[in-house]
Image (spheres, helix red, strand yellow):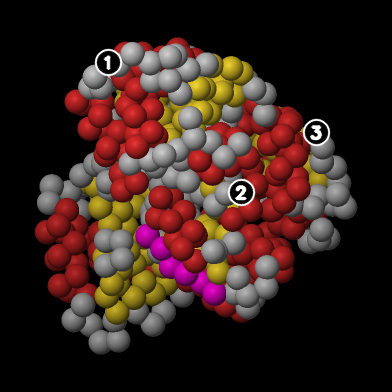
Amino acid sequence: MFKAYDIRGLVDEELTPDFAFATGVAVARFLELAREPGTVVIGEDMRPSSPSLAAAFSAGITSQGLDVIRIGLASTDMLYFAAGKLNLPGAMFTASHNPAAYNGIKLCLSGARPIGKESGLVTIENFVIEGTPMAMRNLGVEKKQDLLEDYVDHLLSLVDLSNIRPLKIVIDAGNGMAGHTAPAVFKRLNAEVVEMYYELNGTFPNHEANPIDPKNLVDLQKAVKKHGADIGLAFDGDADRCFLVDEKGDLVNPSSLTSLIATRELLKYPGANIIYNLISSRAVKEIVEESGGTAIRSRVGHSYIKKLMAETNAVFGGEHSGHFYFRDFWKADSGMLAALHAIAALGESTKSLSSILKSFNRYASSGEINSEVSDVKAAIDAVQSKYAKMDGVEVDHLDGLTISGDTWWFNLRASNTEPLLRLNVEASTEARMKKIRDDVLNMIRGDLDIVVLIP
């Protein structure tokens, strides 16, 4: 249940109120050792199990003498806002895009600093396993605080949307937390909003709240064309990620959105550092440098991006998985803030979204392809053995195996949680990309199933 960045498990079978209480006790113990403030902010998503799990976790925290602020229904980035604004540690009850049977806990330190395997999650896990000796303590106090409007105020202070032209926007909330936050944000904009699946429903009756899978974007694509909209937005279950659809109903490559936001942030902060993860398009680095910024390459994963942002004072970081990080948002990720940047760029221009993004789409991409393999290391070694011998090829192991040629590159890396290899390929032409993609897949897959996850 303790993953690389958070805690997730099956409700009732793994993630129970008893477990949540024990984890609250363990988190309180960890926060005391870390000399963190003595109050924890707790948010929860719309899953049926979230209120009871959050209540049990809160009881565990207060049993150790720490106080709790319950902010109620929230997106994950709203929890990060609360942890940043109040400068308190936080816990968000959500399983993000996972199916309805799951729930989880995302944790952060004060100022929305991440807690992952390398920054406290292992310690918390060990405390849960060991148990905490009972001690006589005064119980902490739990109180409630509504921060939705404060969250919206902060977002709109970071992106100027006061002079945008009228826009028609289709938003697919996926029955997730964007159904709670989007109305509060978009009622303040010069926009006509077509709402899709805004009803908060943790059973996800319409489609999985996982926009990284193209099949979950089909309804949005149809709606954008049907309504003649300027842009479509799709959020995942906890609304910390956002994917875009242009006016033609075509999916927007997340690397293009990274490039767009980077150019906007560099106008605000000339010469600044911008972080991109290593499965992002080569175009991101090129566009950042053309815009006068410094592009910094990162491993995949929010804890790595946030750590690198802190070390380099980067103003923005983008991941090809749809996570976008902002220095002005406590270095945390916010799908809503990324969406507002896209809307501002569109509303300030007379061009369509596809026209604005055209110069950012420079290469052919495979998307992320998953392969089940019995021996991950052997498969990676076999691929490296072949490609490393080629002339003019560079090899690096920042995150898995990356092989780079003059007009192409691919990355092959193992999943943190499953016996999977994830492949991303990019090249200057579609034909070249497909040739490399098929060659690598033939080496690692045999007759195994391949699933394309990212368009």
Residue 296 falls inside the magenta stretch = yes
In this view, 79 is above or below 118: above
Name the residue rendered at 28%, 57% in the picture: 413
Residue on which disc 2 sits: 329
Name the residue rendered at 28%, 72% in the picture: 396
* Category of crowding for the residue at label 3, using alpha-carbon neighbours closer than 10 angstroms: few (below 14), some (14–19), many (at least 20): few
Left or right: residue 440 compared with residue 284: left
Where is residue 430, by image quadrant?
A: bottom left
* Category of crowding for the residue at label 2, using alpha-carbon neighbours closer than 10 angstroms: few (below 14), some (14–19), many (at least 20): many
Residue on which disc 1 sits: 134
The three-letter code of the residue at mark 3 reads: Lys
The stretch of residues the image draws in magenta is 294-299
Earlier residue among tags 1 and 2: 1
The three-letter code of the residue at mark 2 reads: Phe
Spatial CA distance of label 1 from label 3 is 49 Å
In this view, 233 is above or below 407: above
Residue 281: % across, % down: 48, 66
Spatial CA distance of label 1 from label 2 is 38 Å
Earlier residue among tags 1 and 3: 1
Residue mark closest to the camera, 2 vs 3: 2
Left or right: residue 138 compared with residue 338: left
Name the residue rendered at 25%, 52% in the picture: 414
Residue 374: % across, % down: 13, 47
Could you tell me which secondary element the residue under label 3 belongs to?
Answer: loop
In this view, 137 is above or below 2: above
Mark number, residue 187: 3
* Category of crowding for the residue at label 1, using alpha-carbon neighbours closer than 10 angstroms: few (below 14), some (14–19), many (at least 20): few
Could you tell me which secondary element the residue under label 2 belongs to?
Answer: helix
Left or right: residue 333 compared with residue 377: right
Q: Main secondary structure of the magenta part?
A: strand
